[in-house]
Amino acid sequence: MPAQLPAPAARFTHRQRELAELNLVRESAGRLPFAVLSGPGGVGKTALALRWLHNVRDAYADGQLYVDLGAFSPGGPVQPDTVLHWFLLALGVPAEEIPAERSQREALYRTMTADKSLAFLLDNAISAAQVRPLLPVTERGVVLVTSRHRLTGLEIDGATIVDVGFLNPSESVDVLAELVGADRVRAEPEAADELAAACAGLPIALTLVAGRLRRHQRRRLAREASTLAERGRLLQLTPEDGPSIDAVFAASYESLSPLAAGLFHVCGAHPGITFTLEVIADVSGLDDDRVEDGIDELVDRNLLIDLAGGRVRFHELVQLHARARAEDGVVRAVVEWYLDTLVEADSVIHPHRAMWGPRYADDFPSRGRFTEREQAFRWLRDERETVRAAFTEADRNGWSDLVWQYCEALWGFFLHYRQYDDFIDTQHRGIAAARECAEPLVEARLRSQLGFALAHLHRYDESIAENEVALHLATGHGHQPSVATALAQLGRCARGKGDLPGALDYYRRAAELQERLGVTRGVALCRRRAGDVLAKLGRYDEAEVELRAAAGLMEELGDRNQYARALMVLGTTQRHRGELGESADTLEKALSVVRGLASPFYLAEVLSALGDLAEARGDLESARDYLTEAREHYLAAGDPQAAGIATRLDRLIRGQGGA
């Protein structure tokens, strides 16, 4: 009786989903239980197959047959007729009685396996054609195949494809604890998390790291994590009896067609983990059908993962391997593709604001990707992390001309989705890039934008410092629009610090300058801000004049967002005057406008104002409803005002309970 299965791994954790799928395959009635374990190199397919087969081996009384089909061995894949020879010998056929012809060997093999209770492991298969002649005819056996390819062609032979995925972070830490000892992991939980993240859920990587730690019992996990922190260092780790992780991936790459190999290079140039085929098609210059064919091959080879919504995903370590093959020119082309698309989205979202940079010029080629504001917002929301990664790539490579253009194009999105930490970091890098490019007016603009964000976080002294530098640069180069912007931002800081007369002076100076320049939108913005300050000073009649003028100008310009904001401030002013009915009408009008703008921040502002009004009218239930929705939108926008709204809601609820 043949008993050819190698021993299972001494330690084996998790994979409960995959083990359960294999159990279901074994329960299939009326046909040979047959499964293909598919996944990238190093993910643990063979270890899983051996563990499961050893668990069930007693159910197969006639033994087990095993072969390494050598998909990526130096000598090339093993031919089916050679395997048939080996298997026939194992089944008791004398060597001199094994036919020379492959077709005769197959016939004899079918005879020898008919109605036998055998377990088969066909390891490291390269194709369905290699596997198919080795399938027995018995229904009493079981066949497992492992492959880095999906081998979907075997589904017509009754195979179930079982995808062997990467371990999640918690599972990865459990594997480390199993391999190096739970005490060491408990002693350094943060370092264990870092090591798990570095290994990115790939069992072979976890095993190699654990092996290093077992050999060096005194080595702290934190030191090992620091050692492996350098990009690509983990890929070079090599076990004593096998290739490095990088070599495992290289073997999969070398089997690709020229089309798929070329697209693998382009995908490797992508800064993010997930992406759509659109960017790959545009950068590669191939038509959609060719790109889809090549990407399908990469998915079939488990070098990419198919996702819903037309997206694909890299595994982090596979991406590092692919990135080493990407050319700098292709990397820059991908980074510029995202900048081009970002500029197109920004132009649709904010058509009324003055925009800087060569990509905003009328003669710059545009693909016309976005026809509606919501479509542009949706792309920005979906691609937020990728855009951030592309910006970081530009900064890391020293492409300063692209860095500052990213900052300009991200401004409009920030106004609606206020991720302050990311934005402030981005602006600091953009300011450095503008200085590197000797663009003082770009620097002034970015400093004022940075000052805007700092002021909203009540970091007024820092904001003043940025805007004073911006004012100095703008004045020195005689650029009056930038002077007006800096003055308006200094007015914001004065208002925040309680210097209302000073704020009013700044706003009026900025408005006069915008008036002389003929910038109607700039005038309207300054008049709205001045109206807000006048209301806080109790000069309601003057405030209403300014606010109605600002709203009228924005309505004429077709800037619905700023029109709604002017109405919101006007409605708030009317509430302070005790004109609650008029305030309700004005704020409801603002709400009807802003609900169609896909802007969570500005929608939250109007809802918050309506909550204030409802509370002033004694309608605490409506106040709670408005503020609850406002908080949800502040959270969606990433704005810290969500915490203040939560406090107000708590006070309202407790007040109602007391009543």
Image (cartoon, rainbow, N blue to C red):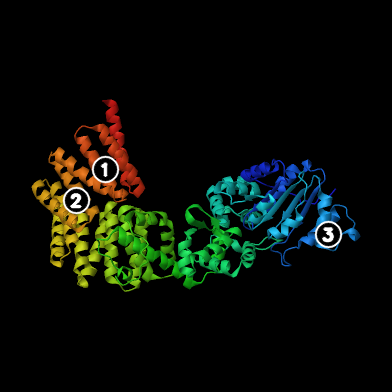
Question: Which dot, 2 or 3, sits closer to the camera?
Answer: 3
Q: Which residue is tagged 2?
A: 566
* SS at circle 1: helix
Residue 346 position in % (x across, y down): 32, 60
Which amino acid type corresponds to the residue marked 1 in the rendered image? Answer: Leu
Image-quadrant location for residue 254: bottom right
Q: Earlier in the sequence, mark 2 or mark 3?
A: 3
Q: Are marks 2 and 3 in contact (CB under 8 Å)?
A: no
Residue visible at 81% across and 62% down in the picture? 102
Which amino acid type corresponds to the residue marked 2 in the rendered image? Answer: Ala
Which amino acid type corresponds to the residue marked 3 in the rendered image? Answer: Gln
Residue visible at 27% across and 49% down in the picture? 602
Which residue ends up furthest to the top in the rendered image?
A: 659
Residue visible at 88% across and 52% down in the picture? 92
Residue 30 position in % (x across, y down): 72, 42
The one of 29 and 400 positioned closer to us in this rendering: 29
Image-quadrant location for residue 452: bottom left
Q: Earlier in the sequence, mark 1 or mark 3?
A: 3
- Tag of residue 607: 1
* SS at circle 3: helix
Cα distance in 3D space between marks 1 and 3: 80 Å
- Tag of residue 264: none
Q: Which residue is tagged 3?
A: 104
Q: Are marks 1 and 3 in contact (CB under 8 Å)?
A: no
Residue 473 position in % (x across, y down): 24, 69
